[in-house]
Structures are given as C-alpha cells and as structure tokens.
Amino acid sequence: MDLSASAWDNRYINNDIGWDLGIVSPPLKAYFDQLKNKELKILIPGGGNSYEAEYLFKQGFKNVYVVDLSKTALNNLHNRIPELPNNQLINSDFFDVNDTFDLILEQTFFCAIAPNLREKYAVKMKELLKPNGKLVGVMFNVPLNENRPPFGGNLEEYLKLFSSHFKIDILEKCYNSYKNRQGRELFVKLLKD
C-alpha cells in the first residue's frame, strides 16, 4: 500500500479520486451555514480538491488553510480560487503541521491514512486545536477496504478512540449525507477541553 506524496499526486493527476464529491459535503455545508465568526482559523487536512475550503472562502472565511500531500490537488484548488493566499495551501504531511486552529474539518482524511496512524491522528488533532477548538466533520460508518484507502470505521471504534482525547459533543448518523453516502456517514463534533 503506497500512501506516499507521489502516489496521492498520481491519483489526482489520473482522476482516480472516487471519494471526491465534486461539491461541498452537505453535512459540512449545513454546519458552515450556521457559523457566525468569519475570523475563525480553519484547517482542512488531506483537503484534496477541497470544495469545503472554496465554499468557506467564498462565504467570507478568509483564514482557511488546506494541507495535502498532493501538489496537484492544491493546484486544482488554487485554480478555482486564486485569491486564496498561497501560504494557506500547505503541501506537506499533516503530521508535520505546527500551527494552531480554532476549527479543523474532517472530510475523508481519516479514512485515507493508514489505520495504524489513527491514535497519532487523534493526538495530533488535539495538539493543533486552540483551547476550546473543535474537530468537526464526517466519518465513514462502514467497513471499507483493508489494503488501500478508503479505510472504513465504525461508531464504537470512534467512541473509543476520541473519548480519551476530546469531549464528544456529537457523534451520530448523518441525516443529510450526499445521496451515495446515505446511511454510511457519521457526523462528528469533538471539543478540545
């Protein structure tokens, strides 16, 4: 299983990105639409083409940062919103990010990393969040692939993993998932205490 930067870049170059909805994820859009503070510093790890970043930026959230291993994915985003400052497009490994954020968005990143990195993911997310920061997003609630991304997961696994690092505010089935993800996603809102 090759999860290197070049492997991810090749997937974007070859349009081998079946997880990419081509639009902002409906559960995340609903969450964004109720946010009032446009000054929030937001990170989207493993953001890929990041329609979420595009939507937020166009709604006036100017402190949106996207980190991805794929330079092609970041270029795709830059081509769609050239006003997004280059320093907010981070071509790097998520685990190497050294900043803090008010809000981190989860949208297919968790299922893209090797399952043995999930504990490290939880620790790093907590480290990257400012006090009272939030990790919000959607996670698959189905067993997917075992030998390549996307890797699945389930509610019990997430409860066990996140309860030791965060206050779990919401971890429940999505009511507004995209049509091909109906019944397969959980909405998660975790609080750094």
Image (spheres, helix red, strand yellow):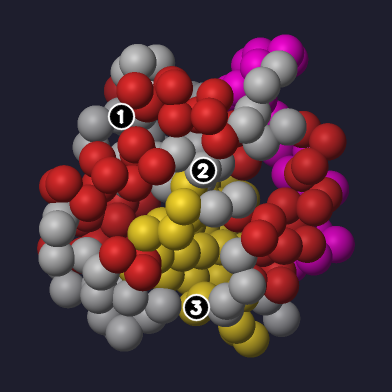
For badge 1, the amino acid type reads: Leu
Residue with the mark numbered 2 = 69
Query: Does the rendering let one see residue 27?
Result: no
- Mark 3 vs mark 1: which is more N-terminal? 1
Can you say which quadrant of the picture contains the N terminus?
A: top right
Q: Secondary structure at mark 3?
A: strand
Q: Nearer the viewer, residue 171 or 78?
A: 78
Quadrant into which the C terminus falls: bottom right
Q: Which mark is residue 21?
A: 1
Where 39 sits versus 134, above or below?
below
Residue 87 seen in the current view: yes
Q: Which residues are magenta?
A: 142-169
Residue toward you, 98 or 121: 98
Quarter of the image holding residue 144? top right
The residue that appears at 35% across and 15% down in the rendered structure is 14
Name the residue beneath numbered marker 3.
Answer: 102
Q: Nearer the viewer, residue 6 or 146?
A: 6
Give the SS element for disc 1.
loop
Q: Are marks 2 and 1 in contact (CB under 8 Å)?
A: no
Residue 47: mark in rendering: none
In the rendered structure, which disc, 3 or 2, sits on the residue that comes first in sequence? 2
- Give the residue furthest to the front: 6
Image position, residue 25 (x, y; %)? 32, 41
Q: Position of residue 106 (x, y in %)?
A: 51, 50
**Counting other residues with Cα less than 10 Å from the Cα at mark 1, is it few (<14), some (14-19), or many (20 or more)?**
some
At horizontal 44% and vertical 59% (from top left) the residue drawn is 90
In the displayed structure image, the side of residue 43 where residue 167 appears, left or right: right
Q: CA distance from mark 3 to mark 2?
A: 22 Å
Q: CA distance from mark 3 to mark 1?
A: 25 Å
